[in-house]
Image (cartoon, rainbow, N blue to C red):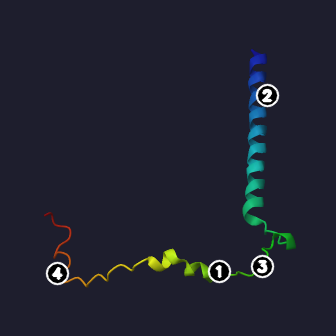
Amino acid sequence: MAITILKEKTKKTYLIALLGVVIAVVIFLVWQRFFQKPSTTLSSLPLPPEEIKINFSVLENPFLKELQPFPEIPAFEGQMGRANPLSSY
């Protein structure tokens, strides 16, 4: 009878120690993630963009010159909406 009580006691001791280790690891990870300031080094800074060159000669394509604009849509004439938009039809 004494042996089973001793086994249960040691099992509880190991579980409590394991729980303490897990809690310590979680607290360490939260501390590292949220409370430590990030270090900025020269390698982590973004490089300035290279000079951008736009090729406007693409707009001179004969296919683009054949395109026609859409006709202009006239303004809406009439009453817009309903007095109560939540009422059923």
**Residue extending farthest front:** 62
Q: Looking at this view, is 44 or 24 the one in front?
A: 44
**On screen, 23 above or below 14?**
below
Q: Label 3 belongs to which residue?
A: 48
Q: Which quadrant of the structure image shows residue 14? A: top right
* In-image side of 84 versus 57 (left or right): left
- The residue drawn where x is 79% and y is 17% is 3
Q: Tell me the number on the disc at residue 79.
A: 4
Q: Tell me the number on the disc at residue 10.
A: 2
- The residue drawn where x is 25% and y is 85% is 75
Measured from the top left, where is residue 59 in percent x and y? 56, 80
- Cα separation, mark 4 vs mark 2, equals 83 Å
Measured from the top left, where is residue 79 in percent x and y? 16, 81
Which amino acid does the dot numbered 3 rest on? Pro
- Rendered-image quadrant of the C terminus: bottom left
- Cα separation, mark 4 vs mark 3, equals 54 Å
- Cα separation, mark 1 vs mark 4, equals 48 Å
Q: Are marks 4 and 3 in contact (CB under 8 Å)?
A: no
Q: Earlier in the sequence, mark 1 or mark 4?
A: 1
Q: Nearer the viewer, mark 1 or mark 4?
A: 1
- The residue drawn where x is 20% and y is 76% is 81
Q: Tell me the number on the disc at residue 55.
A: 1
Which amino acid does the dot numbered 1 rest on? Asn
Q: Looking at this view, is 8 or 79 the one in front?
A: 79
* In-image side of 12 versus 88 (left or right): right
Asked which secondary structure carries label 3, the reply is loop
